[in-house]
Amino acid sequence: MSTQQPDDTIRAIEATLFASEEPMSVDALAGHLGGLENAIVRDGLQSLQEHYADRGVHLVERGKRWHFETAPDLAHLLRREREQVRRLSRAATEVLAIVAYHEPVSRAEIESIRGVQTAKGTLDVLMEAGWIKLAGRREVPGRPVIYATTQEFLDHFGLSSRRDLPGIDELKAAGLLDPVDDAYDALQEEAEAAMQASQEADDHDEDEADALEGLDEPAA
């Protein structure tokens, strides 16, 4: 029984990705392999992805770059006995979420969204973790530094791109939105409605007072 052998292009893509220290884009692979057409490289990647789908390593795409990684159900076999758990404070978690959903974003914009000041150490922790990076400066007076997420952020959370970030409904369903915040928002809406009703009542009373004052004036 004969087995179909992969063609030379697929073998070259496979070897290149295995040897690469960093994930590679289609453009990078095409250039490295002598200027192949991108469509040919994509077809090769698709074939390799299907080939490795049930094996101990998988070919995956993260942020438009491709690399091999351990199959998720076997990852525990490669973990070290001592694994340092990276824990983020509530402030760091909030800042990371704001950067992910609003990037590129400045520190002042982060503080405006959070409603509180952000310690420089919070941003430093996220940068040391490799999850956010400096993304230049905003072209406004003062030219503040702006921040964005990194490829390591996508890799760590298993995201192909920022488009895969969960939406509000998904966050609520997963219990990741604080119900206290929802209750506070509801109270805020009730308070605003009450203030509007009170203002309308005051305007009505003023209209009635003006009308009665007009009746009290002597006829000319």
Image (tube, helix red, strand yellow):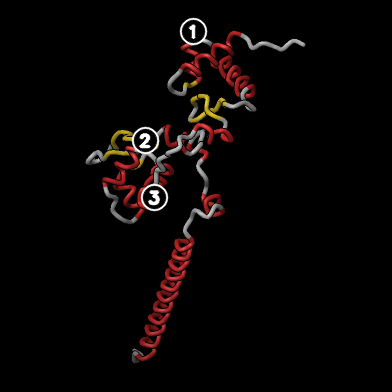
Residue 86, x across and y down, in percent: 40, 43
Instruction: Give how far apart the Cα atoms at labels 2 and 1 are.
Output: 33 Å
Q: Residue 130 carries which label?
A: 2
Task: Kindly identify the amino acid type of the residue bearing the numbered disc 3.
Answer: Glu
Q: Residues within 10 Å of mark 1 (few under 14, many from 20)?
A: few
Q: How crowded is mark 3: few (under 14 residues within 10 Å), some or many (20 or more)?
A: some
Secondary structure state at the residue bearing disc 3 = helix
- Between 7 and 83, which is closer to the camera in this rendering? 83
- The residue shown at (33%, 47%) is 109
- Between 94 and 57, which is closer to the camera in this rendering? 57
- The residue shown at (39%, 48%) is 93
Q: Residue 34 carries which label?
A: 1
Location of mark 3 (residue): 94
Which quadrant holds the C terminus? bottom left
- The residue shown at (33%, 52%) is 112
Residue 5, x across and y down, in percent: 67, 11
Q: Earlier in the sequence, mark 3 or mark 1?
A: 1
Above or below, 181 against 218 in this view is: above
